[in-house]
Image (cartoon, rainbow, N blue to C red):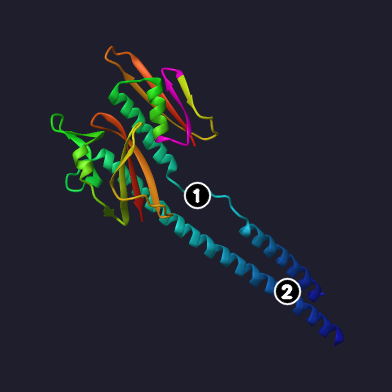
């Protein structure tokens, strides 16, 4: 009788230890999975914003859109019936204003001719984790110019 | 006898669970997704296109253009095999190459390497 009792006691402690350890491990694993999911969601959001900003800046130098200059300010060559990628229409570029596209706000647009001072078309410097500053080199009035785009989400 | 067997089996289970937990808790080194490389590549293409459109391949001017677009980076500008090194070489490089023919149909090659 006493043998059965002691065996039973030993078995219960063993089971308790195993069960507690298992629960602890399950808790740790679920915490880890939850943390990873949160991090991935934040990274994905950041990535999507950077992607939109980069594509928007690319559109400025490669497309032509008279209605919305920030969707394209490349020069349209009527003679060749084509848009000249990398050569910008200064007049169109200077008419650009703050613009939001798919949750991305273009807060600042600037021009800097190589070796000259920066000229801001609109906006002001924004130092934020949600903003990305991009530079593209173009020809503007035949001069090499760096176009600075600051896009924020 | 059965109790003893049960005890040994559970110990193994604990060890297995601990190992499983330790494996799952291991920090997996993952690369943060980013588009920096794409943007560098776009800027390299801008430089190559602009040089081609201008048709002037002055070494100093090309170096100045490179620094205007990549102010804190190092790189190599190679024109027909003649290299201009800007800054110090890094370990990761992103390169672009432009091949073109001049008016005399002579082949020229510009290679641009940016160290990240």
Q: Under tag 2, what secondary structure? A: helix
Where is residue B112? Give x, y as percent. 42, 27
Q: Quadrant of the C terminus of chain A?
A: bottom left
The chain that hosts pointer 2 is A
Q: Nearer the viewer, residue B15 or B48?
A: B48
From this viewpoint, which residue is outermost toward the bottom? Answer: A1
Which chain is home to disc 1?
B
Q: Is residue B3 left or right of residue A99?
A: right
Decide if residue A151 is on the left or right side of residue B6.
left
Say which residue label 2 marks: A17
Quadrant of residue B45 within the rendered picture? top left
A77 vs B8, nearest the viewer: A77
- Counting from the top left corner in percent of width and height, residue B91 is at 55, 34
**Where is mark 1, residue-wise?**
B32
Task: Tell me the distance, in whole angstroms, between the alpha carbons under discs 1 and 2.
Answer: 39 Å
What x and y, as percent, mark residue B46? 34, 33
Write the start and end of the magenta stretch as one range.
Answer: B69-82
């Amino acid at each position: 009788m006493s043998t059965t009792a002691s065996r039973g006691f030993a078995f219960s402690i063993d089971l308790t230890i195993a069960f507690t350890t298992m629960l602890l491990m399950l808790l740790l694993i679920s915490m880890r999975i939850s943390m990873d999911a949160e991090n991935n969601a934040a990274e994905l959001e950041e990535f999507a914003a950077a992607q939109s900003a980069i594509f928007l800046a690319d559109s400025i130098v490669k497309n032509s859109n008279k209605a919305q200059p920030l969707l394209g300010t490349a020069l349209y060559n009527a003679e060749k019936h084509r848009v000249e990628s990398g050569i910008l229409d200064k007049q169109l570029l200077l008419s650009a204003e703050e613009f939001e596209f798919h949750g991305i706000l273009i807060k600042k647009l600037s021009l800097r001719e190589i070796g000259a001072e920066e000229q801001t078309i609109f906006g002001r410097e924004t130092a934020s984790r949600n903003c990305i500053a991009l530079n593209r080199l173009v020809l503007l009035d035949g001069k090499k110019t760096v176009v600075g785009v600051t896009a924020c989400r | 006898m059965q109790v003893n067997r049960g005890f040994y089996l559970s110990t193994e289970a604990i060890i297995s669970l601990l190992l499983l937990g330790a494996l799952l808790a291991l920090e997996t080194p993952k690369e943060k997704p980013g588009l920096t490389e794409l943007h560098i590549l776009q800027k390299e293409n801008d430089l190559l296109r602009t040089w081609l459109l201008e048709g002037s391949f002055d070494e100093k001017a090309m170096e100045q253009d490179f620094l205007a677009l990549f102010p804190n980076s190092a790189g190599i500008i190679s024109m027909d095999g003649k290299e201009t090194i800007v800054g110090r070489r890094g370990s990761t490089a992103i390169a672009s190459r432009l091949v073109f023919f001049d008016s005399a149909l002579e082949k020229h090659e510009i290679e641009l390497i940016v160290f990240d």
